Amino acid sequence: MLMPRLPTTFDADQRYPVDLHMHSTASDGALTPTELVTLCAERGLTHMSLTDHDTMDGIEEAGRAAEQAGLCLIPGCELSTRWQGVNIHVVALMPGGLQGAMVEGLIQQREARIQRAAVIAERLEKVGLSNALEKARLHAGSDRPLGRPDFARALVAEGVVPDWASAFKRYLGSGKKGDVKAHWPEISEAVSWIVDSGGVAVIAHPLRHGLTRRKRGLLMDTFQAAGGQAVELVSGQQNPDSTRDLARQLVERDLYASMGSDFQSCGPRQHEPSAAHGGAPHMAASPAAAPARCVTRPAGGRLNHSRVIAKPGQLKAKSAMLYRQCLRTGVTNEPIFSDSPGKPSETPHRSVDCDHS
């Protein structure tokens, strides 16, 4: 089956059936890889990437499902890294699959997550969550490395906190007892794993790291110097003016633009309100055709290596209303959490502690 080519431009009036950042139960997503692929097919996607946190364990299952559904699956993952003391996520788009330096890199990431979970459990036991590791494992539902969301569910289930948001506000958010700074690699090292393995390195959701414009530019400079090629121009719910400014930063550095929903679930899990991130969910958008608001320079049509993503160019909008509507919802017109069906949420995304993995 011949797959349609990726667009050479992202036009203001078009939706694009591409989502290059999503999660499954292989990390902190609510859907299995097969269920996620099925949802993407139902939403009309033609190209997707499964990018679970620090693992590619779901790729094989997703690949089988994608073949049956007629979707083009780009293997990938989302790496946890450090830059100047800040947690920065880097999406690895791996057209050739898991190979090269990424093999050892993901082993290293898994071990870092296991060690971090043990420290989080030890700290949470001191605030009233007995047998924290075992209870978090119960809520994870598998033997994957545990993340903070698993401990948040355990805190709620044991009555230590009333809800998911409170778990992060009191114990797991940035600077709290359960916010353990794992031994993540420096961003330059992680980028080298990706590039040396034939992949494309993409800075994930750059507007959610709480950086000033200047610091975001310095991050991009470090990232690019290490071999990084792209930045997510559109990711979930975003402010249109911020997105336009971000596009300028990409153009100045000749970086590619990627887009992805950062999808996790079709709705809040039990005990997980949509306000978990201070008014807007971390995974604010569902995988769907993407109304990107920029016109881009051609990057070629076939899906391989740097052609996975397109160059940002001059932004345009035929009407301010349409412009705000499309950029507010990021990569979809159907955000999971909205004020009413079909109506995008007006709640802005707060750029604080975006790493809830």
Image (cartoon, rainbow, N blue to C red):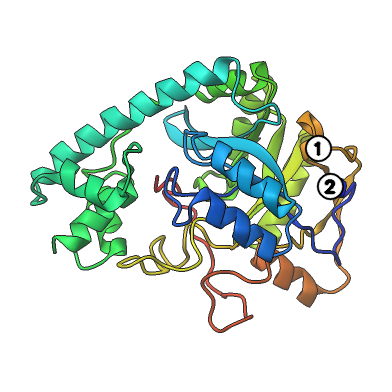
Secondary-structure class at tag 2: loop
What amino acid does circle 2 point to?
Met
Give the mark nearer the N terminus: 1 vs 2: 2
User: Where's the C terminus, which quadrant?
Assistant: top left
Q: Which residue is drawn at 55% across and 21% down?
A: 102
Label 1 belongs to which residue? Answer: 303
In this rendering, the answer to whether 159 lies above or below 18 is: below
Few, some or many residues within 10 Å of mark 1 (<14, 14–19, 20+): some
Percent position (x, y) of residue 350? 48, 59
Count of numbered badges drawn on the protein: 2
Q: Which residue is drawn at 37% across and 65% down?
A: 269
1 vs 2, front mark = 2
Label 2 belongs to which residue? Answer: 3
Viewer-proximal residue among 225 and 198? 198
Q: Residue at x 50, y 45 (%)?
A: 209
What amino acid does circle 1 point to?
Leu
Report which quarter residue 342 is drawn in.
Answer: bottom right
Report which quarter residue 300 is drawn in.
Answer: top right
In this rendering, the answer to whether 100 lies above or below 187 is: above
Residue 238 visible to the viewer: no
Q: Which residue lies furthest to the bottom in this view?
A: 340
Percent position (x, y) of residue 99? 60, 19
Few, some or many residues within 10 Å of mark 2 (<14, 14–19, 20+): few
Q: In this view, does 146 lie to the left or right of 5?
A: left
Percent position (x, y) of residue 145? 34, 36
Measure how far apart labels 1 and 2 are at the Cα level: 10 Å
Residue 155 visible to the viewer: yes
